[in-house]
Every structure is written in structure tokens, then in C-alpha cells.
């Protein structure tokens, strides 16, 4: 059952940046079920917040009755995508790529329904890994113009820093992916980030040349924060979706700490709430604005990590800011051996080690500005050494303390006798 207005849903929520034919694609989505795809190259062990745009865009189209293909790029990952990169990506071992791909499958399953043929998951290594190079050049490579490829911004930028021949092939392989999915599944739409525009258009053109078929391209905008901070970057680095890399509590807290000006935008992009309800939340001001961020954090954490983990993260957050309780056990913690602690550990180093600060200079600034504390005690000197007296005994041979950076970021430190 197709729900009309799918394209308008994407546009009104902020998912549309460039589209090869807005009127044509909107009409097609209203008339019939459309098979579409987005590729995810498993270059890391986890997807991250930057992938949420694509995941939610796919989910909205599937909810409107269309069929997604999540393409795991274990084949293209073997050479590396130059798009948006100032230098070549490192070549990963095939075993690492395959292990990453399996983790991606689980995470994507949080957003898409693959049951009963409602969605498909493919791996482009299935058709790329065994290609005969000479045959591929004769049948596919002849359709590509080097001059046209070099006209795209991705390649222009990389020519200044050095573009390897292996990376130059990436656009050809991604275009071939689109052709294969068109031939096998009738795929008519490829989506991706703005940096993928040239690659997607190349795939459209290849389908037209080889099959005489009509296909579409749609890209999502780069998401930025109003305070200029790169989206999805925390003190510890990328905001991954894997709970072993970023705990549900840390993930929840990230969204509580975004600027007020961004709340409405992220509610539209990263939740399924109705636009009318989002508009009401967006109108909340000053202290009331925290309610909107709490709703965002709860909804998104629930989608990524499950409702139970989201509820636990909320409970922990409330316990941290309003009192004590068993929920504090879910707060991120770092354990240090008593012997190492006894040799002397500066609080500045401890803030870096726990991830509350990204560097020693960041920790120094925090301390000098009066924003660092252990329990109720403010840390006054950059060189101050952590003392066991600053921690409370929580069991035989075990002490705990709660570091705070600024007003809202906490981390437990546990000292244990070996």
C-alpha cells in the first residue's frame, strides 16, 4: 500500500538537497512502489551519527510503502571512496571489511524491516570481487568520460593533493552497482550524501546508456550544528551507534547537550514524531526547551539502542543531576588500578583518560575556567594530583569518584586494589 506524498515528507523534514528530477520522482513515488538504495561502505566497525540522515530517509520511504535496498559496500570498500576526503583512505584487510559488514547489518536492521521481501540487503562484493578486468573495461568502462569525471568537485579537490588510480575507479564501480540493482531488482532511485552526487549521476547515466532505462538521484544535505561543531563529534571522537563504542547513556547525553537552536531540526530529521508535535516542542523556550531535547534524546536513543536502554539512559541522567541511586551504575566508568593511582595521576590527565576532555590543553582550559570538579570539590590547579581522599569507599579495596566537566558531563572513576 503506497502512501502519497513520500517525496514531500522527505523535503519537509529536511532530507532533500539535490534531486535529478523532483517532479518526476515525486510523481513516481505517488504512483507505484519504488525500489531504492543507499550504499554503506564498512570502513569502520560501526555506523555513526553521520549515517542517520540516510537511515532515516530510507525508513521514511519504506513506511510510505516503498522497498529499500541497504547495500553493504564490502567490494567498493576494498579500494576506498575519495568523496569528501583530502587524502586516500587506508586499504583495509578483507577480513576486517567482512567483520565490519556483519555489524552494519545488525545496526541497519534497527531502522529497516527486511521481513517478507519488504526490504533487501545486498553486498556488492558478490558481483564486484569476481569481475574480469578486461571484460569490465570493454562492457562498462567505455561508457565513462574522463573529462566528465574530472568535472565533479570530488575529483577536482583530490587532484590537488593526489588522486590514485585505484580511487579513480570508485565512481565507475558505484555506477555499476546502480546498474546491477536496476537489472536485478528494478531499482529506480539511489540516495546518498551530497558528496555522492557525482557518483549517483554517473550511475543514472550508465543505466540510460546500457538499458535505456530511467533512474533518479537524490542527495541529503550535510548536517551541521548551529554552534559550528561538527555533527556527531563528542569529546571521545565519532558518535558511533555501537553501544560498545559509545554507551546508550553517552549517546543520550549528547542530544541533551545540543544547542537549543538545533532541537527542531534534529527532531524532524531523527525522529518519527509528527511535524505538528515537533512545531509545539520547538516553540518551548529557555528552561522549557530542555523538555524538547529530552524528547529528542529519548526517541532517538530508543530507535538506535532500544526502548529499554533509552529508559535506562534517561533514568541515569536524572540520577546524575538530581541525586543518587542504582541508576548511576549505568554512567560511563573508567577503572584504574590502585598501584597506578598511587604513583600519582594529575586530574588533567584523568579528564583526558576518561574522555571528558579531548586533550591536555582542553583539560587545562577546563580547570583554569573553574569547570572541573571531583564530587563536590572544584579542581583548582592544573597540576593537582588526584588523591584517594577525594573518592568515597564503595567496597573492600574499591573507591569511587564522579568527575564533572562543565555543568552536564559526568564520568565515574573507580579505583580498585589489584
Image (spheres, rainbow, N blue to C red):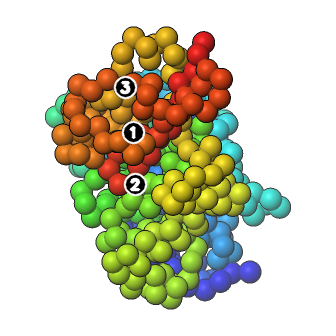
Instruction: Point out the image quarter for the N terminus.
Output: bottom right
| Circles 3 and 1 in contact, beta carbons < 8 Å | yes
Q: Residue at x 61, y 86 (%)?
A: 4
Q: Is residue 149 visible?
A: no
Disc 1, SS: strand
Q: Residue at x 59, y 47 (%)?
A: 328
* Neighbours of disc 1 within 10 Å: few (<14), some (14-19), many (20+): many
- Inter-mark Cα distance, 3 to 1: 9 Å
Label located before the other in sequence (3 or 1): 1
Q: Is residue 5 visible?
A: yes
Place of residue 207 in the rendered image (x, y in percent of width and height, measured from the top left): 51, 56
- Give the residue pinned by disc 1: 374
**Which of the labelled discs sits on residue 9, or is there none?**
none
Between disc 2 and disc 1, the foreground one is 1
Instruction: Point out the image quarter for the C terminus.
Output: top right
**Which of the labelled discs sits on residue 408, or is there none?**
2
Label located before the other in sequence (2 or 1): 1
Disc 3, SS: loop
Amino acid at each position: 500500500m503506497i502512501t502519497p506524498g513520500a517525496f514531500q515528507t522527505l523535503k519537509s523534514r529536511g532530507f532533500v538537497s539535490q534531486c535529478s528530477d523532483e517532479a518526476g520522482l515525486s510523481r513516481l513515488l505517488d504512483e507505484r512502489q519504488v525500489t531504492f538504495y543507499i550504499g554503506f561502505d564498512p570502513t569502520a566497525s560501526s555506523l555513526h551519527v553521520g549515517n542517520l540522515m540516510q537511515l532515516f530517509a530510507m525508513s521514511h520511504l519504506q513506511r510510505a510503502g516503498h522497498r529499500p535496498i541497504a547495500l553493504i559496500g564490502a567490494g567498493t570498500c576494498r579500494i576506498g571512496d575519495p568523496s569528501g576526503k583530502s587524502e586516500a583512505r587506508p586499504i583495509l584487510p578483507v577480513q576486517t571489511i567482512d567483520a565490519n559488514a556483519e555489524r552494519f547489518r545488525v545496526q541497519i536492521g534497527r531502522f529497516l524491516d527486511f521481513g517478507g521481501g519488504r526490504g533487501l540487503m545486498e553486498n556488492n562484493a558478490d558481483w564486484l570481487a569476481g569481475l574480469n578486468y578486461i571484460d569490465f573495461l570493454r562492457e562498462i568502462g567505455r561508457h565513462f568520460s574522463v573529462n566528465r569525471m574530472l568535472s565533479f568537485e570530488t575529483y577536482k579537490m583530490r587532484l590537488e593533493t593526489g588522486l590514485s588510480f585505484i580511487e579513480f575507479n570508485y565512481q565507475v564501480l558505484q555506477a555499476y552497482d546502480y546498474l546491477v540493482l536496476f537489472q536485478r531488482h528494478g531499482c529506480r532511485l539511489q540516495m546518498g550524501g551530497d558528496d555522492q552526487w557525482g557518483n549517483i549521476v554517473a550511475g543514472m547515466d550508465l543505466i540510460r546508456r546500457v538499458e535505456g532505462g530511467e533512474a533518479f538521484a537524490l542527495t541529503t544535505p550535510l548536517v551541521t550544528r548551529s554552534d559550528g561543531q561538527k555533527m556527531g563529534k563528542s569529546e571521545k571522537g565519532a558518535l558511533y551507534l555501537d553501544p560498545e563504542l559509545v554507551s546508550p547513556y553517552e549517546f543520550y547525553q549528547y542530544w541533551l547537550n545540543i544547542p537549543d537552536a538545533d532541537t527542531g531540526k534534529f527532531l524532524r530529521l531523527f525522529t518519527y514524531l509528527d511535524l505538528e508535535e515537533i512545531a509545539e516542542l520547538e516553540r518551548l523556550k529557555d528552561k522549557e526547551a530542555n523538555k524538547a531535547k529530552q524528547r529528542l534524546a529519548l526517541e532517538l536513543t530508543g530507535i538506535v539502542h532500544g526502548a529499554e536502554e533509552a529508559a535506562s539512559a534517561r533514568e541515569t541522567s536524572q540520577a546524575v543531576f538530581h541525586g543518587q541511586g542504582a541508576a548511576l551504575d549505568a554512567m560511563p566508568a573508567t577503572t584504574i588500578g590502585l598501584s597506578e593511582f598511587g604513583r600519582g595521576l594529575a586530574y588533567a590527565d584523568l579528564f583526558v583518560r576518561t574522555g571528558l576532555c579531548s586533550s591536555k590543553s582542553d583539560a587545562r582550559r577546563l580547570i583554569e575556567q573553574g569547570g572541573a570538579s571531583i564530587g563536590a570539590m572544584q579542581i583548582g590547579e592544573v597540576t593537582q594530583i588526584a588523591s584517594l581522599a577525594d573518592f568515597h569507599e564503595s567496597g573492600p579495596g574499591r573507591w569511587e569518584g564522579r568527575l564533572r566537566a562543565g555543568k552536564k558531563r559526568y564520568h565515574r572513576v573507580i579505583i580498585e586494589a589489584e
